Amino acid sequence: MLFHDVVAASAGLSATRSRRAKTAILAELLSAVPASELATAVAFLTGQPSQGRIGVGWRTLSQLRAPPSAEPRLTVTEVDTALGEVSESVGSGSAARRAHVLRRLLADATRTEQEFLFRLLTGELRQGALEGVMVDAIAEAVAVPPDAVRRAFMLSGSLPTTAAAAMSGGSAALGQFGLQVGRPIRPMLASPAEALEEALAELGPVVVEYKLDGARIQVHRRGDEVHVYTRTLRDVTARVGELTELVRSLPCDSVVLDGETLALTDEGRPRPFQETMSRFGSTREEQLRALLLRPYFFDCLHLDGTDLLDAPLRERNNALRKVAGEHVIPGQSEPADPAAILTRALDDGHEGVMVKSLDSAYAAGRRGRSWLKVKPVHTLDLVVLGAEWGHGRRTGYLSNLHLGAIDPAGGPPIMVGKTFKGLTDELLAWQTERLPTMETARDRATVYVRPELVVEVELDGVQSSSRYPGGVALRFARVLRYRPDKEPADADTIESVRAMLRG
């Protein structure tokens, strides 16, 4: 298949806000692409080369820009092969070899293909929400239920692999994917509830647990082999020795546990979130020793050869208590006084509570209504779209942040507001250094960036507004912290923001 066909499909996606239209564009392309190029085409269209990040930035590509080809001639395979050569080129002379391959590739590309390659290789095409549209497109192209594709994707961890299986073997091939100990799956996500009473009324029989201000972890153990993964499925086993030792001591042979971890003060209260997250990036031995992490597990997805994803939460909780013992998160099933649990959680320094249906299966990677989070303050996870230069004491610093919510139709994030409140001097200095490395454009007042950073904001609520394209605006928003543990696809959607307006 010509690379031009993939680029044209991408342009069609950008030209419409309709999820239905986006699905149709992708389904038509998937039906036409040869089997040998399917996985590569899916990877390109969801914004990431099959090789992953290849270490090429905008500045390097700009220096290699060549006059474009007048006619499309590159194939999908040729582009993938060239990127593979760049990715595999290491050692002495590698910079020159990488430059030669990229220059040749760009010279063979048309102007629109060059622009697509620039955006693909610099991460500007990555839109996590587009993965959901691709799932629907795969289902439409093969005439299988979207849930079958979604489940296979969450268990395989690879959308290109899932697409290849669906196109070659339909539902039967998709059904072959299962939980594999040692291969992380996307975590189940929660939706916000306005109040505890609302959550209890919606879900029926529930468990009410503490909602911690920690870092999400997923641990896998088979025998003595243990892996610890973050929310974004990054393997951090080497950095959290105390967690691997603890999991290795649990009374089982194999297990997959979902939970949170956080650092505690000497009084047993949670340390600031940033201190917990520092452990996942630290290579300093003294920091690894000084800041110990405590795990709190709240779900069991596999135990001693039995997969529990499809079992109801009440059954998974029985397995959890059996294997995790004192390391189970504080909470109670069908509590007589749910409000007392919320009060205790807040008194202990935590965010609030989670209310979970005891009849629910584990919906990997989904933000549904089976898990509801109840917090006394409104918060949203939003994507940074840009920042304005500050004034007065903040002159010379990038200050006022432009904030966007995720478009569930797979389009770019939708701006919902701005804020400069809550930014410490440390954060101002950090984002002034960091944001220009992600720059896509600028004017006299603002630096616009790729939508890669997630920031958590506290707000009084939202209001109707014609100022922003989503029709809503944040009220009195202030920055709480950046969320390095979250991908843009984990941020709140425009639908979640609008739901706060209805509330």
Image: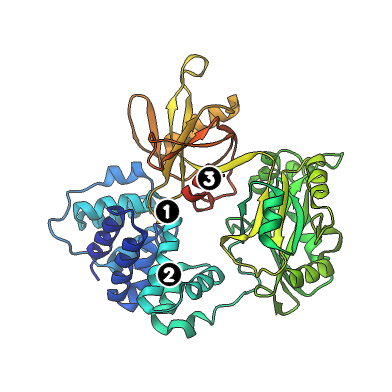
- For this rendering, which residue is in front, 167 or 418? 418
Q: Tell me if residue 81 can be seen.
A: no
Q: CA distance from mark 1 to mark 2?
A: 15 Å
Residue 475 visible in this rendered orientation of the protein: yes
Counting every numbered tag in the picture gives 3
Give the x, y percent position of residue 213.
Answer: 70, 45
Check disc 1 and give the amino acid type: Gln
Residue 319 picture location, percent across and down: 79, 71
Circle 2 residue:
160
Mark 2, Cα crowd under 10 Å, few <14 / some 14-19 / many 20+, is many
Q: First in sequence, mark 1 or 2: give its number.
A: 1
The amino acid on which the numbered mark 2 sits, given as a three-letter code, is Pro
Quadrant containing the N terminus in the rendered view: bottom left
Q: Tell me which label, 3 or 1, sits earlier in the chain.
A: 1
Kindly state the secondary structure of the residue where label 3 is placed. Answer: helix
Q: Give the residue number, with chain letter if any, for mark 3.
A: 502
Q: Position of residue 401 (x, y in %)?
A: 47, 32
Q: Is residue 467 left or right of residue 101?
A: right
Task: Report the mark closest to the observer, 1 or 2.
Answer: 1
Residue 175 is labelled as none
Crowding at dot 3, Cα within 10 Å, few <14 / some 14-19 / many 20+, comes out as: few
Q: Which residue is mark 1?
A: 127
The residue at the point 35 percent across, 44 percent down is 58
Count residues near mark 1 (Cα–Cα under 10 Å), then give few for <14, some for 14-19, many for 20+.
many
Question: At x 43% / y 82%, what residue is drawn?
Answer: 170
Determine whether 248 is above or below 408 in the image: below
Mark pair 3, 2: CA separation: 38 Å
Kind of element beneath mark 1: loop
N-terminal of the pair, mark 3 or mark 2, is: 2
